Structures are given as C-alpha cells and as structure tokens.
C-alpha cells in the first residue's frame, strides 16, 4: 500500500463542568458548528453531533494523522473558548476534563449516528445506552 489508510470511526462523549446544564438551546447550534469546523480543520469527518444540556456526543471518521486525544482536546478547547469569548463572554462555561471514546464499526455508523442525533428523545424516554454516557 503506497499511502496510509484508515477506516476508523470514533464516538466521543464529554460533559459540561459538574454536569451543569450549560449547553442551552440558544447556543447549542453555535457550539456544534465550532466542533464541526474544528473536525474539518483536523481532517476528520464529523458524521453526527448531538446531546443535551449537560453533554455532547460526536461521531467522527479519523484520518491517519491524529489521535483521539488530540481531537477531543481541540474540539473541547475551541468550543469552550468560543463560548467564553464570543457567544457568552462574562458567563460561566466549561467542559469537564475527561471524555469517553468508543470505536464504531462501519456497519454500525447509521445506528450510532441516529442515536446521537436523537439524544433529546433518548433522554426523555430514558432509552439511552448507559455505557455511552459519562
């Protein structure tokens, strides 16, 4: 093989500081846009993003050039910085320092993407998958 090749899909989950309801409806899409933009900058494919007030899920395809830790650090850091300096300056916003990451098979992409996109419904119905929640 002349070039590096990966077919890796990662489901990342991270929470707000102390699980506070900081990802409110009025800023959620702006936060998601920042995360998607950072994925693009890192040559990742953001397949799905979703969450509720106290956590975010991201399903991404990975290139050969980055690590899960570097993606998590970049998307969390840039989105937090944007909220604190652009979207809501002088208001508290912070992510927890940790994250969860789970591999997803190619055949599982649609199922996991649907799960992520429907977070609000899953949490209303309590039909979420507990080990995917931090």
Image (cartoon, rainbow, N blue to C red):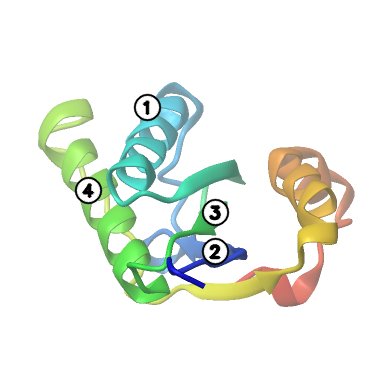
- For this orientation, the residue located farthest to the top is 26
- Residue at 33%, 60% (x, y): give it: 95
Q: Is residue 3 left or right of residue 103?
A: left
SS of the residue at dot 2?
strand
- Residue at 40%, 45% (x, y): give it: 22
Q: Are marks 4 and 3 in contact (CB under 8 Å)?
A: no
Q: Position of residue 12 (x, y in %)?
A: 54, 64
Q: Position of residue 15 (x, y in %)?
A: 47, 62
Q: Is residue 93 left or right of residue 90?
A: right
Pointer 3 or 2: first along the chain: 2
Give the residue at mark 3.
60
Give the residue at mark 4.
78
Give the residue at mark 1.
30
User: For the residues marked 4 and 1, what is the alpha-carbon distance in whole angstroms?
Assistant: 12 Å
- The image quadrant that residue 128 belongs to is bottom right
Is residue 96 shown above or below 50? below
User: For the residues marked 1 and 2, what is the alpha-carbon distance in whole angstroms?
Assistant: 18 Å
Is residue 106 shown above or below 82? below
Q: Are marks 3 and 1 in contact (CB under 8 Å)?
A: no
Which one is closest to the eye, mark 4 or mark 3? 3
SS of the residue at dot 1?
helix
Pointer 4 or 2: first along the chain: 2
Pointer 4 or 1: first along the chain: 1
User: For the residues marked 3 and 2, what is the alpha-carbon distance in whole angstroms?
Assistant: 11 Å
């Amino acid at each position: 093989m002349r070039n590096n090749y990966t077919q890796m899909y990662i489901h990342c989950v991270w929470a707000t500081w102390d699980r506070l309801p900081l990802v409110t409806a009025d800023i959620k899409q702006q936060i998601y846009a920042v995360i998607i933009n950072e994925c693009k900058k890192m040559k990742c494919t953001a397949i799905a993003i979703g969450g509720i007030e106290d956590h975010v899920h991201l399903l991404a395809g990975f290139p050969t050039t980055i690590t899960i830790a570097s993606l998590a650090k970049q998307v969390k850091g840039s989105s937090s910085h944007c909220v604190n300096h652009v979207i809501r300056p002088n208001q508290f916003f912070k992510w927890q320092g940790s994250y969860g990451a789970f591999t997803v098979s190619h055949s599982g992409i649609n199922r996991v993407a649907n799960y992520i996109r429907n977070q609000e419904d899953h949490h209303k119905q309590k039909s979420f998958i507990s080990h995917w929640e931090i």
